[in-house]
Amino acid sequence: MSATGVASETTTRGGLGDNVVRPDGVAKVQGSFAFSGDLTADGFLWGATLRSPHPYARIVRIDASGAWAIDGVECVLTASDVPGRATYGLISHDQPVFAHEYVRFEGEPIAAVAADHPETCRRALAAIVVEYEVLAPLTDAERAIDGSHPPIHPDGNVLRHQRIVRGDQSIVGPITVEGTYELGMQDQAFLGLEAALALPDPGGEGVELFVATQWLHEDRKQIAACLDLPEEKVRLTLGGVGGAFGAREDISLQVHCCLLALRSGRPVRMAYSRQESFRGHVHRHPGKVWMRHHADASGHIRRIEARFVLDGGAYASTSSAVLVNAITHTQGPYKCDNATVDGWAARTNNLPCGAMRGFGVVQACFAHEAQMDKLAAAVGIDPVEIRLRNAMETGDHLITGQVIESVAPVARAIRETAALPLPDEPVGGHDGDPMRLPGGAGLTADRGHIRRGIGWGVSIKNLMYSEGFDDYSTARVRLADGVASVKFATVEVGQGFVTIAGQIARSVLGVDDVVLETIDTKIGSAGSTSASRQTWMSGGAIDGACRLVRERLFENVAAAHDLDAVQLAIDGTDVVDTLGTLRVAVAEATAGVVIDETFEYHHRPTEDLDENGQGNCHTAFAFVAQRAVVDVDPELGLVKVVQIATAQDVGRALNPMSVVGQIEGGIAQGLGLAVMEEIVQVDGHVRNASFTDYLLPTFLDMPDVVISLIEEPDPMAPMGAKGVGEPPCIAATPAIVAAIRDAIGKDISRVPVRPGDICLTEVG
Amino acid sequence: MSSEMYSLHVNGELREVRDAWVGESLLFVLRERLGLLGSKGACEQGECGSCSVLVDGELLCSCLVLAAGAVGQAIVTIEGVAPLGAPNDVQQAFVDCGAVQCGFCTPGLIMAAHALLERSASPTEIEIREELSGNICRCTGYGRIIEAVQSVAVARRSAT
Amino acid sequence: MPTTSVTVPRTLSDALRVLADSPDATVLAGGTDLMVELNSGHRGATDVVVVNRIGELCTWQHNPQLGTLHLGAGITYSEIEQSPIAGWVPALAQAARTVGSPQIRHAATIGGNLGTCSPAGDGLPVLCALEAQIHLASAAGERTLPFADFMVGPKRTARVPGELITGVTVPVLPGWQGYSKVGVRNAMVIAVASSALVVDQEQQGVRLALGSVGPVILRCPEAEALVAAEGDFQSSRIRSTVVAQFAELARRAARPIDDHRSTAEYRRHAVGILAARQLRRAFPNE
């Protein structure tokens, strides 16, 4: 195991740049950390959801009287019980709280019950009679966008269509490479299943919800609208979150749980099963991407043509934003002045899709990286050289016309990755343990059956929200008696924001003790924990609040010692006079004083795209290069990833240990999409909604990861630090698939790569 | 639903289970009847390892153990491996090495790592990977967890 | 209907008495299959008899005179994976190592694997190739069935209500034997295709059994006859053309289906590769 770039020692100081351990770490290793599914209340009821067995059907009749008749059942709800807005959604509210008239995907909620035991709930759900007129589902995204199918939703079958047209449209060749690339539907598969506890206010005037989510304030807005309550009557507190990866951006059980509590007058706990979770949240968009690259004889890209079709499933969720992310990243981290791109997000009767780590860029990167390898082959140079020749730099343009102002160390990332050592072990390792071969304990192969390949994936990823969204985060910092209390609504999903929150306060304020207050809606919004944005946004908010507090601290000290506040600074845990000799401990300077400041951080505004896809729609960018080494059994089609080497542009590593954790975890998810993870649907029916059949990478599937952190602080970023969560997940998939192609000499164009794709198809 | 009363030996104590439906898994009983919330459920199929406990010394998925069938067996959960606030060496290593992110898989992994290190003082990397392969972690990519387990093995060896 | 009673007999006679009283009771061994169904509410079980605490079923006997190994139904896959059992039936140990995860192998028993009798059950191709004898008991008496008569369909066995699988007897053979399994992941995976090859040095023959490629575990008599005729058992020699024919006969014996785990085409292809590679391991010389 090797991970370069991680200092092994930690400091007690615990400021920025240190390998500080998580403040919730001990509770998590001891099992005492309260996840949302662990929360309970006296006299609570269990809630459960009735879901459609059909991908598309008209609801003829619902008779819930059978459920009411069961002993222990306290509440049964259907669409007619929703007091407020009947639909919800992140961008357009097109998704019913409970299906009304039509069900549009398998698993769509139809009713909810509350009862004394999960088994009672199960029986109550079984006792609800729903009569359906089953309709033929629309499952082909191409049919959804070509207008040949009647609308399956009042808003139509096209969730968004967006073009990008830039530069000279007549450029052709001289070198041309093209391909069509497909991606299956990936699930976020966080381990902590959807769960919540709702507590009704006496008299039903409001409700308190403890929930695992990614964005408390957005949830509150949507819940309040559906419950017809003022937002202040809906109070949210974060329940411990067992991973998110995008799947908790949308509402799942929130409205159901609150409404069951309000109607029954009792606390209600809801917890999805894994099977239910697969249908209860949005997924990564499956898609088809066609690209044609035109290049000069030396491989410089002259023009790119592309067409994206993403299957958004039954409801809009964030499909329109995912589509824009996909198409605006068509060129990858490479220079390109001319482009013609056509992008579609389709509505079908498949499972709804929305946010997942990488957010559209995964689809683009899988295609553009395959294209770069084809281009390298056509020009006759190696995959590293083609990427270096085209590598984007600060000041270059995106095909939207936007200038890349971020630090853009693309060439450096490629070179540093190339310089990282290749695995020193031969196929099968020195010890000959069969666990090291593809097939592992299955003893499918001997060393002689295996071929090794090497592949590259390089990516660009936008950070924060786009297209004119007023993206901000709020933090309050209170300094008293040498202790800083920090309040924010930033959702901790496991990424470690709670760790760096303390690090920021320690560094800026010179305190040792930092108290993190409860994460809830009693402060302004922090925005979502997504889009690699919280270190930048909420980190920026805490940094800003700390600086305001520090200014007042300096004013106090300056007044007390008849100095000018501007000459004061923090040194360790002291306030010092940079021009004199004064040195006073922060603890002493704040004895009996309370300084309280709130700061709202906004990133610079972005714009909508025009009809030609032009506009400064993104905020900032991060880059990564990865090199994958894989062993492949060409006859059986089995793969073992041996090593991923990566150099990542992180701006500044505020907590190197956390950064490494994000990189390794992101690579695992990219590996999953490359070789095993896919929700299989047949005619809209999900075939593998369980961990027995939806396969996630295990300890034996993950390779060694060798990491080099590129630290070029970004001047636009509050502390120079870029988000680090998404890029590794994006680059890993194309790198691994390129390595498979290299090993077997075949053109693989679809992920996840199935064994039959390797061993049953003809050489491409 | 039929219910009955029975007792389970959990973390060295005899605990009465009341009003339980007899089809309940050990995981459900530990969490909902006995208030031991440290064991986590993420799949209900034995495919994730988050609910791992020791039953008569064997590492098992508590979601696949019928609670009423475990009468008379010695059950150790995450709550039983170290007192609250005093993590053992495996637990502390997970914290120190960055092996914890969301933490949902962590109690099960602690149980599995604990069982591995009790049996094998110097596990190789590939042995660690195989022995922990029943525990899915979606956040970390496993690298820091392997480092944590190795660091415990090294520390224990140098202590003896 | 949910579970209404749980009985935990400690002796075989107690267990058989309980089963005689409620012959339709569900037998719970390691729980790794049945608990999945209970947790999901898919099981119509009424009474459950837990059989993994019956001491008599948790033992094994090796009989060197007869050249047999008897495994009690309660022997777990983690026991089979290790010495001494692994030394006597290495193919079964190899299969055991591929069963689920360490946690699953600590719980899952050979009796339970037989009771569920899924075509993807990892122990079953080995038991089939070894021509294992399956022992059943009821209050009315005992009987023994060869594996081929025991497994009658996908998840269907010859066990009748009131009967309990008490154990399995397999021969301890001197020749090469092995189990290979294709799954899409390197651990914790259900077989997409599997193959068990056993060399019977004394009889100068091989036995090949295929898993996950038909409604039951499939033997391949034509492929076996080919090796009996063409293989050199003294010097472990076989011609490559025979290996290729062997693979083709294995492919032809397969009766796979398409499902969400794989395609019939791939399964058929894969068992051919597995069988060929195993034959080459058994007969390393050209």
Image: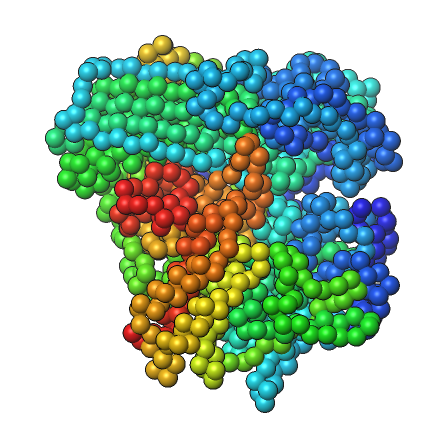
Q: Is residue C73 above or below residue A404?
A: below
Residue occupying the point 51% across, 80% down: C173
- Residue A530 appearing in the image: no
Q: Is residue B32 above or below residue B57?
A: above
Residue occupying the point 82% across, 31% down: A67
Where in the figure is residue A155, as x and y percent of width and height? Answer: 54, 13
Q: Is residue C19 above or below residue A98?
A: below
Q: Quadrant of residue C100?
A: bottom right
Where in the figure is residue A585, as x and y percent of width and height? Answer: 49, 34
- Residue C163 appearing in the image: yes
Residue that protrudes farthest toward the bottom in the picture: C65
Q: Is residue A487 above or below residue C56?
A: above
Residue occupying the point 79% across, 25% down: A63
In front of the other: A574 or A236: A236
C63 lies left or right of A549: right
The count of marks equals 0
In front of the other: A558 or A76: A76
Residue occupying the point 50% across, 18% down: A149
Where in the figure is residue A343, as x and y percent of width and height? Answer: 38, 20
Q: How is the image coloured?
A: rainbow
In front of the other: C286 or A372: C286
Residue that protrudes farthest toward the left in the picture: A297
